[in-house]
């Protein structure tokens, strides 16, 4: 404790804190702004009264919540990280942290009153006494937390009073996966390691953590935390791994996730402190997850009683109990299901008959943390049965009309051998299995696989065991589902009435843009394009330009003989097809698909003319491309490049802006912003150009070039800071530049996609659901809608 004392002014304004639990009541702590100097944006100093107006400084409190330990006045905000303070994470959770071992550790959590911003404690490591209830200002709450969670415990010799299980698990994300595993295993072997650290070290070593490093040395692999479940998930391409490598990854991942379950079981409202945990308690809690995870089945069974985030999406409404409702409810619940082993799954269903078919994965028996082979086999069989039962509950919870669920469990991967397959009826599930769930009987760890099967009362069961109880490959149960995988081009069903006018189509097949159909000139085009690709210089392309022109003339001649009154149309993707109503002559307009090569030939000739300097013909062809494909970005891009070469910069920009209003593909969007970044820069608006470059997303084809040109722009224009994405979007909107994909695309995709799924027109809906999954349209929509999309092709 510092000996430095400071005298407060005679009429200094102070705010005295209430007594701190466990401390001498004669110790008086206050917040005051009367001590000078202070940094800007200050809430004052936390001081302790020694005698009269004599005080000892303990910390400086910054506006925003940061707290810096100090024993004398400071003039400027310290450049180091704060020692403690209030903060808010990405989910909006408000918490108080202290810095232990160089890392922020959450010590308390709060709710905030909207009308005045005052805080109420929701959970806390150490007793806050009078501040543990009621509402308090941020400076007072911050000072009380600093004293109770940080300063006073340190005075009492508690060097790490708030190190929690969550803090240890968070270290796994701070370095490469193999290094993080090594550090955690090593940590448990150190003298003085806590019981949790010893158990974590032992369980990871037994799972084969040391073998992750050689896998990571030759493959792209990392560890992540899933926002939907809080569990660890290994990011890798399993198609590149051997079966043995997958087994290692799944075993180690399972060991980590059992630690997450143990954290929740051992802590009530918050992550428990490691100092109070024994190794035995941690092991018991972790192993209990192998059966207790299924306790959520009863709640999941009632899923249809709750409001769905996907019933209304981007202004579109789904039918209650229809295909969209059932599939999104199932996917949302499955994505949020917390199981000790992460599982891959696929599903399909039929709303009319009320049948679900689900497939899921479990690891090999070696991933289960038991000593003998027989124990591991029994544990795996019991776990597989409980996982199947829980997924059946998810299926029944998707809708009251679901009466049958067939769940098949496969080894290692969805393509692996089936090892357990059960058919459940809703009636038996509700009348016999749910009461056993409510009583906890099914969660009893001592139940054998045979006893579980008897308790489950499945309608049908395919399961065979071999030596020592090992699960053998079986034939999965066939679910009674209709075959509805009709190709869009061959689907002559009428469209739902709500889609006829906006899609300018009458039948499902009218929407098809993928079927190549009968194109007698396709082979000729491919031969010409192959010769152009083989050309090593622009002048070598000249002889074939006339052949391309002849090919285009042949297509145009065929168009002249076309008897259909439907307007010719090229679409680069399904989003382009469903937004045609914005670019036609009215509700009675109908469209017919033109051969892709009719568009591609014009696009190629447009490029050749542009490179040859024949800009008049290049622009003419660009305009023809836009006429043939008014909802496809590629057409506007070809026109913009030709206009740019002709020094018609304003027209080129306008073409790209028009193209952005229809762009849905990430590569197309990146291309548009990359080109606009350069055009605005060269046109005298570097700030707008910089904003456009910022919109080019990592991983797209143009990202590298955009980053390079961005640096050059900033140096040339003396711009010191690039905008973040939110700032870039605001700049674009202020200047009338569309932020792609524009909302209308999502709204139309939702309207058409939901209606097509509800009507059972899955092939036509597939690409639209894929596009919706790329937008932030609902909680965890990327994963949920990706799962729904896969269900449409099962």
Image (cartoon, helix red, strand yellow):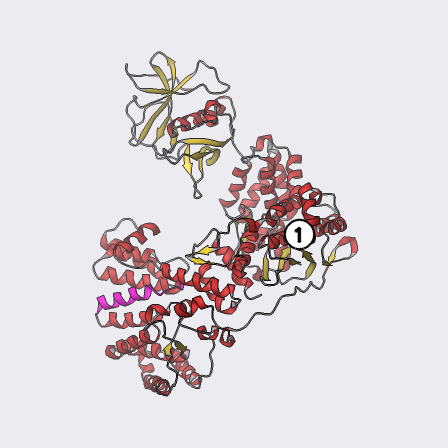
Residue 375, image x, y percentages: 74, 47
Taking the image as shown, residue 316 lies to the left or right of residue 240, namely: left
**Residue drawn 38% across and 57% down?**
697
Q: Is residue 658 magenta?
A: yes
Classify 674 as above or below 306: below
Dot 1 alpha-carbon crowd within 10 angstroms: few under 14, some 14 to 19, many 20 or more? many
Q: Residue furthest right?
A: 467
Q: Nearer the viewer, residue 285 or 387?
A: 387
Q: Which residue is mark 1?
A: 389
Classify 382 as above or below 12: below
Residue 533, image x, y percentages: 39, 78
Observer able to see residue 189: no
Q: Nearer the viewer, residue 559 or 555?
A: 559
**Residue drawn 51% across and 41% down?**
170
Q: Nearer the viewer, residue 299 or 632?
A: 299
Q: Quadrant of residue 257?
A: top right
Observer able to see residue 242: yes
Q: Quadrant of the N terminus?
A: top left
Taking the image as shown, residue 167 lies to the left or right of residue 728, namely: right
Q: Is residue 5 magenta?
A: no
Magenta segment, prevailing SS (helix, strand or loop): helix
Disc 1, SS: helix
Q: Residue furthest front?
A: 497
Q: Quadrant of residue 529?
A: bottom left
**Residue drawn 58% across and 47% down?**
338
Taking the image as shown, residue 429 lies to the left or right of residue 54, namely: right
Give the extent of the magenta segment: 648-665
């Amino acid at each position: 404790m510092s000996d430095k004392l400071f005298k407060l002014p005679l009429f200094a304004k102070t705010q005295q804190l209430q007594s701190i639990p466990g401390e001498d009541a004669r110790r008086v702590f206050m917040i005051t702004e009367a001590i000078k100097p202070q940094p800007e944006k200050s809430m004052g100093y936390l001081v302790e009264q020694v005698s009269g107006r004599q005080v000892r400084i303990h910390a400086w409190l910054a506006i925003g919540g940061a707290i810096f330990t100090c024993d004398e006045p400071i003039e400027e905000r310290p450049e180091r990280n704060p020692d403690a303070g209030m903060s808010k994470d990405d989910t909006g959770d408000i918490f108080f942290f202290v810095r232990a071992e160089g890392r922020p550790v959450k010590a308390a959590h709060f709710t905030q009153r909207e009308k005045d911003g005052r805080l109420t404690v929701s959970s806390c490591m150490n007793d806050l006494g009078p501040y543990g209830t009621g509402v308090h200002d941020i400076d007072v709450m911050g000072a009380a937390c600093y004293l109770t969670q940080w300063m006073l415990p340190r005075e009492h010799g508690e060097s790490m009073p708030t190190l929690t299980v969550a803090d240890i698990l968070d270290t796994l994300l701070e370095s490469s996966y193999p290094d993080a595993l090594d550090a955690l295993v090593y940590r448990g072997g150190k003298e003085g390691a806590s019981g949790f650290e010893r158990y974590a070290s032992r369980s990871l070593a037994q799972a084969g953590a040391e073998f992750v490093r050689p896998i990571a040395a030759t493959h792209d692999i990392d560890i992540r935390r899933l926002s939907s479940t809080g569990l660890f998930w290994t990011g890798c391409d399993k198609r590149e791994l051997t079966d043995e490598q997958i087994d290692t990854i799944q075993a180690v991942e399972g060991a980590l996730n059992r630690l997450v379950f143990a954290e929740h079981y051992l802590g009530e409202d918050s992550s428990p402190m490691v100092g109070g945990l024994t190794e035995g308690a941690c092991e018991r809690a972790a192993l209990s997850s192998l059966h207790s995870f299924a306790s959520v089945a009863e709640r999941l069974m009632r899923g249809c009683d709750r409001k769905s985030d996907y019933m209304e999406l981007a202004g579109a409404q789904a039918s209650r109990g229809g295909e969209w409702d059932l599939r999104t409810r199932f996917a949302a619940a499955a994505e949020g299901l917390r199981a000790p082993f992460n599982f891959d799954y696929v599903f399909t269903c039929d709303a009319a008959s009320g049948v679900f078919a689900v497939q899921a994965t479990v690891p090999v028996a070696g991933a289960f943390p038991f000593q003998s082979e027989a124990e591991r086999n029994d544990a795996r069989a019991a776990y597989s049965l409980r996982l199947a039962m829980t997924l059946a509950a998810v299926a029944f919870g998707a809708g009251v009309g679901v009466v049958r669920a067939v769940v098949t469990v496969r080894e290692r991967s969805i393509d692996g051998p089936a090892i357990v397959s059960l058919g459940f009826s809703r009636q038996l599930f509700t009348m016999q299995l749910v009461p056993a769930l409510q009583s906890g009987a099914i969660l009893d760890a001592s139940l054998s696989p045979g006893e579980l099967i008897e308790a489950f009362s499945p309608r049908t069961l395919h399961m065979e065991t071999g030596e020592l109880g090992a699960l053998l490959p079986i034939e999965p149960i066939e679910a009674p589902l209709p075959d509805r995988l009709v190709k869009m081009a061959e689907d002559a069903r009428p469209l739902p009435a709500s889609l006829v006018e906006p899609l300018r189509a009458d039948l499902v097949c009218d929407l098809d843009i993928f079927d190549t159909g009968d194109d007698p000139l396709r082979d000729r085009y491919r031969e010409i394009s192959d010769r152009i690709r083989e050309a090593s210089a622009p002048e070598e392309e000249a002889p074939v330009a006339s052949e391309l022109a002849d090919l285009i003339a042949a297509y145009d001649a065929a168009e002249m003989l076309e008897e259909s009154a439907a307007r010719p149309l090229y679409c680069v993707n399904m989003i382009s097809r469903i937004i045609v109503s914005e670019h036609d002559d009215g509700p009675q307009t109908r469209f017919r698909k033109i051969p892709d090569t009719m568009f591609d030939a014009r696009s190629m000739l447009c490029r050749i003319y542009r490179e040859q300097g024949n800009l008049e013909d290049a622009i003419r062809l660009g305009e023809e491309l836009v006429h043939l494909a008014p909802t496809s970005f590629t057409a506007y891009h070809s026109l913009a490049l030709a206009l740019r070469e002709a020094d018609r910069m304003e027209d080129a920009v306008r073409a790209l802006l028009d193209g952005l209003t229809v762009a849905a593909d990430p590569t197309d969007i990146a291309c548009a912003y990359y080109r606009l970044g350069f055009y605005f820069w060269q046109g005298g608006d570097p700030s707008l150009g910089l904003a456009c470059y910022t919109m080019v997303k990592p991983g797209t084809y143009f990202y590298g070039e955009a980053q390079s040109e961005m640096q050059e722009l900033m140096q040339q224009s003396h711009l010191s800071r690039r905008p973040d994405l939110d700032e870039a979007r605001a700049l674009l909107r202020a200047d009338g530049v569309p932020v792609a994909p524009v909302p209308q695309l999502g709204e139309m995709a939702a309207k058409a996609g939901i209606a097509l799924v509800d009507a059972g027109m899955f092939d036509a809906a597939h690409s639209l659901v894929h596009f919706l999954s790329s937008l932030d349209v609902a909680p965890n929509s990327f994963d949920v809608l990706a799962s729904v999309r896969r269900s449409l092709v099962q």
